[in-house]
Amino acid sequence: MALRPGLVRRFLSTSVFSSQTSVSASAFAANASDKPVVSPSMTLFVHGLNKRTTSEKLQEAFSQFGEVVHARVVTDRATGYSKGYGFVNYATLEDAENGVKGMDGEILEGWVIFAEFARPRTPPGQSASPETYPPY
C-alpha cells in the first residue's frame, strides 16, 4: 500500500519525530508535489502552527520576506490558543510569492509550517466540495 506524500509530510512535521531525525523538513517539502497549485493572491494561508503561536510571532516570521500588512492566527474562543492555522496579508504579490517560497516547510516555534496562497471564501449557501473550487 502506497502512502500519500501529504500524509508522510504531516507525520514528519510532528515535534516528536522532528527531534529524532536529521532530515530537513524544507528539503522534504520541496520534493513533495502533492499540493495543488492555487492562483496567486496577496493573502497566504498558513497551517501547522504551534498552539501557542501568536499573531505577532507570525508577522515577525513572515516579515523577512516582504512588507506584511496584517497577520492573524485563528484562535479558539474558549481557550485563546491557536487553532493551528492563520492568514498573512502582504502588500504586493511579489512579497507574497517570496513568503510562500521562504516559509513553506520551514520550522516556526518547533513546528513545521506550511504556507500557500489562500483560496477565496465560499459564498454562503454554496457547497465547499472540491468540484466547486476554481480550476487550476
Image (cartoon, rainbow, N blue to C red):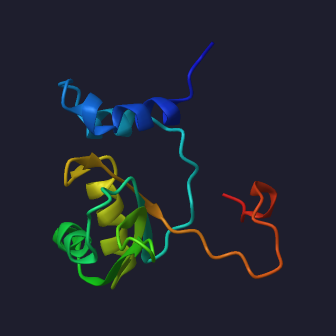
Q: In the image, what residue occupies the spot 33% across and 37% down?
A: 14
**Position of 42 relative to 107 (above/below):** below
State which quadrant residue 100 falls in.
bottom left
x%, y% of residue 38?
Answer: 57, 60
x%, y% of residue 111?
Answer: 27, 48
Q: In the image, what residue occupies the spot 49% across and 74% down?
A: 41
Classify the position of the C terminus by image quarter.
bottom right
**Position of 109 relative to 57 (above/below):** above
- Residue 8 lies left or right of residue 95; in this view the side is right
Most distant residue in the top direction: 1
Classify the position of the N terminus by image quarter.
top right
**In this view of the protein, which residue sits in the foreground, 107 or 40?**
107
**Position of 127 relative to 49 (above/below):** below
**In this view of the protein, which residue sits in the foreground, 98 or 105?**
105
- Residue 96 lies left or right of residue 131; in this view the side is left
State which quadrant residue 131 falls in.
bottom right
State which quadrant residue 123 falls in.
bottom right
